[in-house]
Amino acid sequence: MGIPVIEGARIGAYIVKQHLLGRKRYPLVLMLEPLYRCNLACAGCGKIDYPDKILNQRLPYEDCMAAIDECGAPVVVIAGGEPLLHKDIGRIVRGAIARKKYVTLCTNALLLEKKMGEFEPHRAFNFSVHLDGDREMHDKSVCQTGVYDRAVAAIKAARQKGFKVTINCTLFNDADPARVAGFLDELKELGVDSATISPGYAYERAPDQDHFLNRNKTKELFRAIFRRGNKGRKWAFFQSSLYLDFLAGNQAYRCTPWGNPLRTVFGWQRPCYLLNEGYAKSYKELMETTDWDSYGVGNYEKCADCMVHSGFEPSAVAHAVKNPFAALKVALFGVNTEGPFAPDIPLDKQRPAEFAYAEQVERQLNELVEAEKAPETATAAE
């Protein structure tokens, strides 16, 4: 359904190796955020609500490469913020490819035509352009008119130069299934290779708190979308078939928060790409000192409605490796869009949400101030 055979085989072999080695927790995708700064301010985004001093920070090239080596995941997804604002972004991509990683660079595409010369087409590299539907849907989502047209122009320019391009589409509770299906139909006309589709995560700091989907609404929405596309088989998705089946309510997965670990300018974010509840100084510390059992659906209130690909795609992929016939069935016959949903995880024992954003931001700002003072202190001592 859109994932190249060689890439799928290599990732599958990697997963089998982890199981043979007896590793309970291992990374599938390294999420690399070399900066938080963005040139858009989307209403559903909770990634850019930081003071300027933090937004101006950049993860150096050397630290990006160290994170790739330390983590060891076969796939690297470079996100943000807007990664194209990083002055070394081309070098970071080349460094990741040189380490034989599959690399996806997520972008809103506003700077893509200007920055395209910093990259070269490669079988292991693709741009993932943020498009939350057709022109009206997307411009509403990003709170700015004209962004859809600029993104489409950049996509066409990238395709003409031989780059692989996928679409990253995030849906909220005002999404119309017929329009979403129509948008997916139009992707072929753009020459887009495939799409990644997911419900939005209810970021606590997002300006718009009224349009996030709950789990039941997510399942109903995706079933309605897939019905209009031959049970999803009409479109090419850059995702596993079982994750799509999960979105339609046919699988009841637990989250795999360690599957997509996140490295930011402040270190390794706990516990996952979506939740910011502190940082570890190393990947080893993240894996060994995070209380993983305290997070996820049924364990933590903040996770109750989450069905986002960053947490559940690793669960679906692991299921596919253990039970390839389940994945093959969905690939051949499509996503089931009728009948009862699979039993969901009960929420009666989840712990209440904790809110420590202000405290964390204050701590991060203090660390930046102390780091800036350090050279001055050293000079004075000399």
Image (cartoon, rainbow, N blue to C red):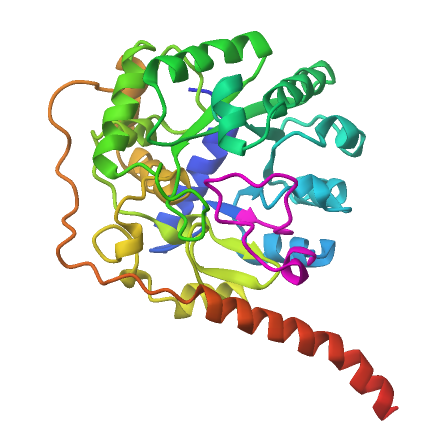
Residue 281 visible in the snapshot: no
The answer to which of 325 and 235 lies nearer the viewer is 235
The part of the image, by quadrant, that contains residue 124 is top right
Residue 53, can we see it? yes
Please name the residue shown 44% across and 22% down the image. 237
Task: Specify the segment rendered in magenta.
Answer: 31-57
Q: In which quarter of the image is the N terminus?
A: top left
- Using the image, determine if residue 59 lies above or below residue 12: below
- Asked if the stretch drawn in magenta spans residue 55, the answer is yes
Residue 341 in picture, x, y percent from top left: 15, 30
**Which residue is at a point 40% across and 17% down the rendered structure image?**
180
Indicate whether 237 appears above or below 233. Answer: below
Q: Nearer the viewer, residue 136 or 126?
A: 136
Residue 214 pos. (x, y %): 26, 39
Q: Is residue 187 left or right of residue 85?
A: left
Q: Main secondary structure of the magenta part?
A: loop
Decide whether residue 286 is among the magenta residues. Answer: no
Q: Which residue occupies the extreme bottom position in the image?
A: 381
Depth order, front residue of 128/261: 128
Q: In which quarter of the image is the C terminus?
A: bottom right
Please tell me which residue is depicted at 24% across the width and 62% down the height of the picture: 352
Q: Is 301 displayed left or right of 153 in the figure?
A: left
- The one nearer the camera, 220 or 160, is 220
Quadrant for residue 208, please give it.
top left
Q: Reply above or below: 89 against 233.
A: below
Estimate the x, y position of residue 170 in percent, counting from the top left: 44, 31
* Residue drawn at 37 percent across, 44 percent down: 209
Q: How far from the left and from the top, in percent, is residue 356?
A: 41, 67
Image quadrant assignment for residue 288:
bottom left
